[in-house]
Image (spheres, helix red, strand yellow):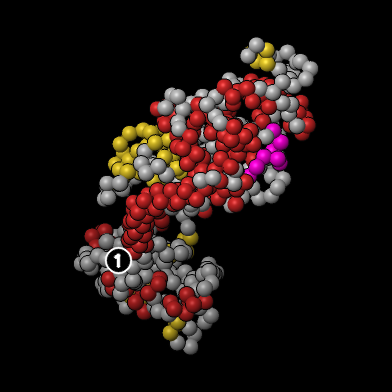
């Protein structure tokens, strides 16, 4: 959200809320969908990622444009182009219904968008007035792909409870899992009637009520849908409604002989015969007999003015693209620059010289501080006197193995290598170098094989091994500091000059 200023809430859906925002650099408006729950919820994460992948795949003039998607604070954000109205708002503004010319142009764009989606094996499953956005130029775009699915085969089993109830096909209402693109065509028929009359065609208050209205208006359900109704545990206490209408009111009592009321409903409305035929073709009960989006584009209602409708559709889409195209490219450049900057900041810095690798200026040594070389800097020699530096030890790429000498004979034998000269004291044998004249306790060396050579150990340094000789010449191994103090007490001269204790 670093590029946008939040303005106000637009709407709220099942999984998220939509907020109107303004881009700080260009002052363009965008609609940002923020998911309610964090990505800790597996269902939310799955839904968000599926919608993002699908929208990146679907690039079409009658499909809403996804500008970018990102994650902040564990929540997913989807940035869309902002369109001023929805079809629902236009229906509410026209209580007597919209004109035929306006509705035909909108339905033409809806069918063009669905034709593209279905060729990409995508079923939207939630076509309704709220999900159809209208730009200021009159361009219609299909939005909200949260319920959209990609049909990988003809026998894909999908969830039945998806679309809004009033626009839900009968195969969805009864729980028939093997459905496809025909559910979107059913919603188009309901949508056309509602835009022309400003009234829903099947305003059921429950799924069972919806089934009753559909059956009594269009006739008995196909056999496979009736079987799905009988096997659905939700309807185990209900019987399949029969088609009957008494005195203009729906009746739940089964009556012999179907009485279809869809013709009467369409006649009472302002629809013409051609419009009524278009709606009835969309509302075919058998999904396999329902026309496709491409076939509906050839219907006489649309075919008579198909060329004019297509020219108008492409014209308004081109005007919108002159605005959204540069804006989309601008956002991509900003994000690419941010990604490049993060990559440069995370790049590995070149190694400094060993003398200045820590990044700190050398500090002067305090008086009495031991100048004991580190393990990595000690140059070891083998039995022939050849240098065996740290490069050889590291080149072997093997874990160092420590092999202590027997306690009875801590003196180095011919198979072990002597200590480095810097770890030798010229006056007192093994000990801290550079402090001649200091009477320190005799420190024996416990020769350890570290890589390819032994290393010394003295108390106070993190070196392996701990072998000390008391003033009586006995070897003291291990033990805590207090026990070692009892075996050897430092002289006043040692205490004044510093030492191991």
Determine crowd level at label 1: few under 14, some 14-19, many 20+ residues with C-alpha closer than 10 A: few
Q: Is residue 186 magenta?
A: no
Q: Quadrant of the N terminus?
A: top left
Left-right relation of 80 to 148: left
Point 30% across, 62% down: residue = 499
Left-right relation of 281 to 29: right
User: According to the image, label 1 marks what residue?
Assistant: 358
Residue 428 lies, in percent from the top left, at 34, 73
Left-right relation of 105 to 432: right
Seen from the viewer's position, the closer of residues 249 and 379 is 249
Give the main secondary structure, helix, strand or loop, of the magenta stretch.
Answer: loop
Q: Is residue 287 magenta?
A: yes
Residue 192 lies, in percent from the top left, at 54, 33
Point 48% across, 88% down: residue = 384
The span shown in magenta is: 285-292
Seen from the viewer's position, the closer of residues 82 and 297 is 297
Up/down of 3 relative to 37, above or below? below
Is there any visible trace of residue 306 in the rendered image?
A: yes
Residue 345 lies, in percent from the top left, at 33, 61
Point 37% across, 66% down: residue = 348
Up/down of 137 relative to 17, above or below? below
Number of marks in the image? 1
Up/down of 59 relative to 439, above or below? above
Seen from the viewer's position, the closer of residues 336 and 248 is 248
Residue 174 lies, in percent from the top left, at 69, 29
Point 45% across, 24% down: residue = 96
Q: Secondary structure at mark 1?
A: loop
Q: Quadrant of residue 17?
A: top left
Q: Quadrant of the C terminus?
A: bottom left
Is there any visible trace of residue 365 in the rendered image?
A: no
């Amino acid at each position: 959200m670093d590029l946008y200023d939040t303005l106000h809430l637009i709407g709220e859906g099942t999984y998220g809320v939509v907020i109107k925002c303004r881009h700080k650099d260009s002052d363009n408006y965008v609609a940002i969908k923020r998911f309610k729950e964090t990505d800790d919820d597996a269902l939310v994460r799955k839904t968000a990622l599926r919608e993002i992948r699908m929208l990146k795949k679907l690039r079409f003039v009658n499909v809403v444009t996804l500008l970018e998607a990102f994650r902040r604070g564990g929540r997913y954000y989807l940035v869309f182009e902002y369109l001023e109205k929805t079809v629902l708002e236009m229906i509410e503004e026209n209580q007597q219904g919209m004109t035929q010319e306006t509705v035909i142009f909108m339905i033409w764009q809806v069918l063009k968008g669905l034709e593209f989606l279905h060729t990409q094996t995508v079923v939207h499953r939630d076509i309704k007035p709220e999900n159809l956005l209208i730009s200021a130029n009159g361009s219609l775009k299909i939005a909200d792909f949260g319920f959209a699915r990609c049909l990988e085969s003809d026998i894909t089993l999908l969830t039945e409870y998806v679309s809004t109830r009033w626009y839900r096909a009968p195969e969805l209402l009864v729980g028939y899992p093997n459905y496809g693109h025909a559910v979107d065509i059913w919603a188009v028929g309901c949508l056309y009637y509602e835009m022309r009359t400003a009234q829903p065609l099947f305003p059921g208050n429950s799924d069972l009520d919806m089934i009753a209205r559909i059956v009594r208006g269009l006739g008995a359900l196909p056999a496979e849908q009736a079987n799905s109704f009988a096997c659905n545990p939700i309807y185990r206490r209900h019987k399949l409604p029969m088609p009957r209408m008494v005195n203009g009111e729906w009746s739940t009592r089964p009556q012999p002989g179907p009485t279809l009321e869809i013709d009467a409903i369409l006649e009472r409305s302002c629809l013409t015969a051609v419009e009524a035929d278009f709606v009835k073709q969309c509302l075919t009960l058998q999904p396999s007999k329902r026309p496709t989006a491409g076939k509906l584009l050839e219907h006489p209602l649309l075919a008579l003015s198909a060329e004019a409708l297509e020219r108008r559709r492409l014209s308004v889409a081109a005007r919108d693209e002159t605005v959204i195209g540069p804006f989309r490219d601008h956002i991509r450049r900003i994000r690419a620059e941010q990604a490049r900057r993060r990559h440069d900041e995370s790049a590995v810095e070149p190694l400094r010289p060993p003398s200045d690798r820590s990044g700190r200026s050398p500090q002067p040594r305090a008086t009495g501080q031991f100048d004991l070389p580190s393990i990595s800097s000690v140059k070891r020699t083998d039995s022939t006197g050849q240098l065996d530096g740290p490069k050889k030890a590291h080149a072997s790429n093997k874990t160092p193995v420590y092999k202590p000498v027997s306690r009875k004979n801590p003196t180095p034998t011919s198979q072990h290598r002597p200590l480095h000269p810097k770890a030798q004291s010229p006056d007192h044998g093994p000990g801290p170098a550079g402090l001649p004249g200091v009477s320190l306790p005799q420190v024996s060396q416990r020769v350890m094989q570290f890589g390819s050579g032994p290393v010394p150990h003295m108390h106070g340094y993190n070196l392996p091994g701990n072998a000390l000789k008391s003033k009586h010449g006995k070897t003291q191994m291990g033990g805590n500091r207090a026990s070692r103090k009892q075996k050897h007490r430092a002289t006043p001269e040692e205490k004044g000059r510093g030492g191991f204790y």
